[in-house]
């Protein structure tokens, strides 16, 4: 029986057997390093699950799955440079370990090779459409990253602005992953488009879920110290939901607290969480997450394919929506 764990295992084996490149080592060792850090492998798993709705031999889509994972990690590598982050998945970031110039160039080659990998899996009749989808997705992710950077200097970011950024930076690649899998499998245009909408809905839920886990998640379950977004003053769904409800005076006090460099991080986290609790942002976030997952599932159910063939994707979504706090 196919599960998210078996797909991840098979994908990881394929990833190791098909390196992005070998020489010069100074270019490709950082690529091997960031890919070896693992992660959820959500995008390749989504692509393979989208393919499996329409065809059985999902290994035919492995190169495309590798392509979207390499592309995703390219964005993380460059994000870490822009954020001056020193840790990724509990390990040193590429630029911290190999230097900024190397990290930039290694990221560039990852982006280029990601398109190459996707092309290897594309049938000739859908090659142009799939490449155009990759190009459009890449552009939207860049737009989302710029908005995220712009938010650093904007105090009063609205919930709607945040959700728009989230859709571009995170959700569209999940939508594209499902759609590419479907297109490679020969799905109808309508089914592929519907899967794209499903992936976007799941991606929107997933990012808000990450925001929620950062503030309220148990360290034993998330593997990360609680309150990282709060300490760094990052604009999240929780933050934008809170300030939307505060009076002007309280908003000023709260935003000053949220963006100050804390001498005692734990005290700052507790102060911010008290405001979050008062504004019931956890409840609002959970309702939004549930709504987005339900919306995505409705899209999946609307696809003209036997329910049995949709179960792998639905099981994956069920495992994601059930992530514990």
Image: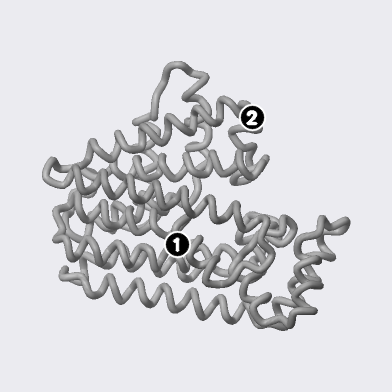
**Is 138 situated above or below 46?**
above
Q: Which mark is residue 83?
A: none
Residue 78 found in image quarter: top right
The residue furthest top is 24
Q: Quadrant of the N terminus?
A: bottom left
Instruction: Give how far across and how far down residue 223 sits, in percent.
Output: 63, 55
Give the side of residue 135 with respect to residue 103, left or right: left
Residue positioned 62% across, 77% down in the render? 282
Q: Residue at x 39, y 29 (%)?
A: 20
Numbered label attached to residue 167: 1
Residue at 20% x, 53% y: name it: 183
Q: Is residue 212 visible?
A: no
Q: Image quadrant for the C terminus?
A: bottom right
> Are there few (<14), some (14-19), or many (20+) residues within 10 Å of tag 2?
some
Location of mark 2 (residue): 97
**Residue in the picture at 67% in, 66% down:** 215
The x, y position of residue 68, in whole percent, is 36, 45
Give residue 150's quadrant in the image: bottom right
Measured from the top left, where is residue 34 in percent x and y? 52, 36
């Amino acid at each position: 029986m196919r599960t998210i764990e078996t797909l991840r295992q098979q994908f990881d084996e394929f990833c190791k057997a098909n390196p992005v490149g070998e020489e010069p080592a100074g270019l490709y060792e950082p690529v091997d390093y960031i890919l070896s850090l693992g992660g959820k492998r959500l995008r390749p798993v989504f692509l393979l699950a989208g393919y499996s709705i329409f065809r059985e031999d999902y290994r035919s889509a492995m190169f495309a799955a590798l392509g979207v994972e390499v592309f995703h990690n390219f964005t993380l590598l460059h994000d870490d440079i822009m954020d001056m982050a020193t840790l990724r998945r509990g390990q040193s970031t590429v630029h911290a370990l190999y230097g900024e110039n190397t990290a930039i160039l290694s990221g560039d080659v990852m982006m280029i090779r990601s398109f190459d990998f996707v092309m290897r899996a594309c049938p000739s009749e859908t090659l142009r459409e799939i490449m155009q989808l990759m190009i459009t997705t890449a552009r939207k992710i860049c737009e989302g990253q710029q908005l995220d950077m712009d938010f650093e200097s904007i105090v009063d970011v609205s919930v709607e602005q945040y959700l728009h950024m989230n859709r571009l930076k995170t959700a569209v690649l999940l939508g594209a992953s499902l759609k590419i899998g479907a297109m490679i499998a020969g799905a109808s245009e309508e089914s592929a488009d519907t899967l794209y909408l499903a992936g976007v809905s799941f991606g929107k839920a997933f990012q808000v879920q990450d925001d929620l886990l950062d503030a309220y998640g148990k360290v034993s379950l998330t593997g990360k110290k609680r309150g990282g977004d709060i300490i760094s003053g990052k604009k999240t769904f929780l933050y934008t939901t809170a300030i939307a409800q505060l009076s002007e005076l309280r908003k000023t006090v709260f935003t000053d607290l949220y963006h100050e460099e804390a001498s005692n991080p734990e005290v700052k986290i507790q102060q911010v969480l008290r405001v979050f609790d008062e504004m019931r942002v956890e409840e609002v976030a959970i309702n939004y997450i549930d709504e987005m997952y339900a919306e995505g599932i409705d899209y999946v159910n609307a696809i003209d394919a036997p329910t049995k063939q949709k179960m792998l994707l639905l099981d994956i979504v069920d495992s994601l929506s059930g992530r514990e706090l």
